[in-house]
Amino acid sequence: MTVANLALIAVAAIAILGAAGAFAVAFRRSQQQEKQDPTAGVSAETRAADKSMAGVRVEPIAVSVPDSEPEDSPPAEEQVGSDLTAEEEDNEPVAVHVVETQRIVEVSAEEGGVSRRQFFNRAITVTFGSFLALMGLNSLAFFWPKLTGGFGADVDAGPVGDLQKKVLAPDGSVLPLFIPEARTYLVPAPDSLSEQFEGKSVEAAGLMALFQRCVHLGCRVPWCGPSQGFECPCHGSKYNSIGEYFAGPAPRNLDRFVVELRGNNFIIKTGSIIETPRAPFRSVDYPQGPSCIAATAEAEA
């Protein structure tokens, strides 16, 4: 598991924990608001006064009576009767009808602040959005090749003049130069290439770049100086000095990279791998000496 995958898993765990925390906070606030006493903080006097007004007598407003009786005033007996009736009415309790009304006051977003629902929705959106963004970046980093440097990009092997000298031993034999950053063996190209390499840009300035991996099961193929070829110690596949198939279970030639010259520098395009079938006629003779695999088998026996 790569570091990028571990980082993605950690970010996903943090996002899930953040969402769970936001949900817990919102749920706790809703429970607290449901259990909260609506009369909390109200004084005892206010609670005592906040009762029904039924049966409470309200004194009538006193009206001044003029001293002189009006001409059309009723007789004294009728007046006494009316006074008794008024006294009886005064003894009856007077009720006050209280009408409750609901007043709705709209407040602005600045005055009301963020509600619980808004807070929860925003927290979920930010958490999920962050998770998707990080997962997308990690996916791009995984699928997108490196733009500069490293395997999968264009690797500058150095001045081509120096490389041409290093791929040959003092006696004129081939001595491949290994480029670790490109996972490549640089070898001298023959004077004439076979038809399977024509138009594929696998040669530049007399040099070719061979992938170090055996095409059978992916083992690294070492160079054998005595036989002047590449011999895989895993299952015995053999190739000549330019990677053409000779023997063994390998299905084709060694893979190679597209190469080019930029100014005086030799560029290996490790993002462009060229596969070629077994060559019916090899461009370079092999073997030119004893096999390293055979020598190793005899030494072990």
Image: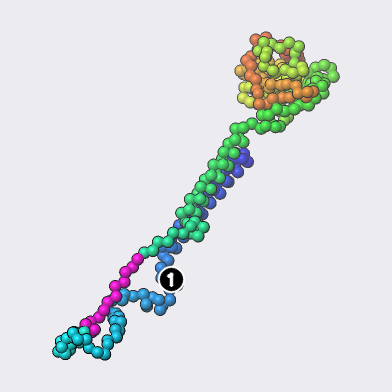
By secondary structure, the bulk of the magenta-drawn segment is best described as loop
Q: Where does the magenta region start and end?
A: 87-101
Please state if 66 lies on the left or on the right of 189 as rendered: left
**Residue 293 counted in the magenta span:** no
Residue 210 location (% of width, % of height) = 70, 22
Q: Is residue 59 visible?
A: no
Q: Quadrant of residue 51?
A: bottom left
Viewport quadrant of the C terminus = top right
Q: Residue furthest top?
A: 281
Residue 279 location (% of width, % of height) = 65, 12
Secondary structure found at label 1: loop
> Where 89 falls versus 6 (above or below)?
below
- Which residue: 68% across, 22% down? 257
Location of mark 1 (residue): 40
Q: Amino acid at mark 1?
A: Ala
Residue 29 location (% of width, % of height) = 46, 60
Looking at this view, is 216 or 103 the one in front? 103
What colouring does the structure picture have? rainbow
Q: Quadrant of residue 100?
A: bottom left
- Which residue: 67% across, 10% down? 195
Viewport quadrant of the N terminus = top right
Please state if 279 lies on the left or on the right of 122 as rendered: right
Looking at this view, is 111 or 89 the one in front? 89
